[in-house]
Image: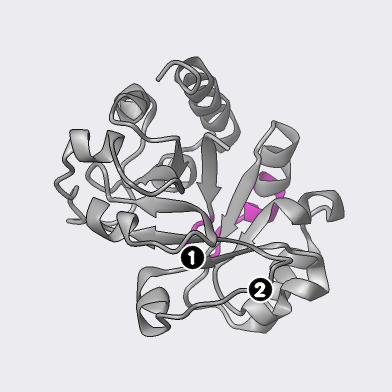
Amino acid sequence: MNLIVISNPNNTEQEVDIVNQLFDEGLQLFHLRKPNANATELRKFLTQINVSNRTNIVLHQHHYIAEEFGIKRLHYKEEERSKNKSLKVNSSKIVSTSVHSIEAYNSLDSIFEYAFIGPVFDSISKVNYKAIELNHNLLKNSIAKIKKIAIGGIEKKNIPLAFEMGFDGVAVLGSIWGNKFPINQFKQLKAECNNYANTF
């Protein structure tokens, strides 16, 4: 789980075909995040994903459709978690979340398998979405045992730094969907992650 791909928030040509190819190339987790999509649109997207890959999809919105597609993973953004302080999830589901500081990460409930922390670097997909300040020592010595996933501005050149900082993996969006050759880009990112994942 050292490399996670997040969907393009907007609909893009051949996105579903690309996602299926990414799974063929060894993608372990795909976060389906379409903030403006309704349930019908998400259902249409999921119907086109190979059935064998649906258990590797993490659903961000319209969680209630998960059962229809055999999806076992749900993601809760920070504001959803904050609004529901006593968030309890069906034990049959694996859940993840997002935070923007080590302090917030350390306060997470143990129900979460991993958390996105960031943006670690200046975002590729969001203009003027700048990196947050992270105390590297706090990151390495954080209290929570939840896996830490770096998000924001992840490229091949800064993957080693993310692992050096103490992250367990990285999540990419702009470096995949902003590339003319997303499959080749994924292969390069995956190879870079594999080089460093077991080093730090």
The residues tagged by marks 2 and 1 sit, at their Cα atoms, a distance apart of: 12 Å
| Segment colored magenta | 7-18
For marks 2 and 1, the one nearer the N-term is 1
Q: Which is nearer the eye, 76 or 125?
A: 76
Looking at this view, is 185 or 51 the one in front? 51
Taking 179 as reference, is 13 left or right? Answer: right
Horizontal and vertical percent position of residue 129: 21, 56
The answer to whether one can see residue 78 in this image is: yes
Q: Amino acid at mark 1?
A: Asn
Q: Quadrant of the C terminus?
A: top left
Residue 101 visible from this viewpoint: no
Q: Considering the numbered disc 2 on the image, is that residue within a helix, a strand or a loop? A: helix
SS for dot 1: loop
Q: Give yes or no for residue 53 being in the magenta stretch.
A: no
Estimate how packed mark 1 is, as few (under 14), some (14 to 19) or many (20 or more) residues with alpha carbons within 10 Å: few
* Residues at circles 2 and 1 in contact by the CB criterion of under 8 Å: no
For the point 48% across and 47% down, which residue is it? Answer: 177
**Residue 120 falls in which quadrant of the image?**
top left
Location of mark 2 (residue) = 42
Residue 16 painted magenta: yes
Name the residue at 42% across, 78% down: 80
Expressed as whole percent of the image width and height from the top left, the position of residue 102 reads 25, 51
Q: Residue furthest front?
A: 143
Q: In the rendering, which numbered label is found on residue 55? A: none
Q: As displayed, is residue 152 above or below residue 99? A: above
Q: Quadrant of the N terminus?
A: top right
Which residue is tagged 1? 10
Q: How many marks?
A: 2
Q: Give the camera-side residue of 24 and 115.
A: 115
Q: Is residue 41 left or right of residue 194?
A: right
Q: Amino acid at mark 2?
A: Leu
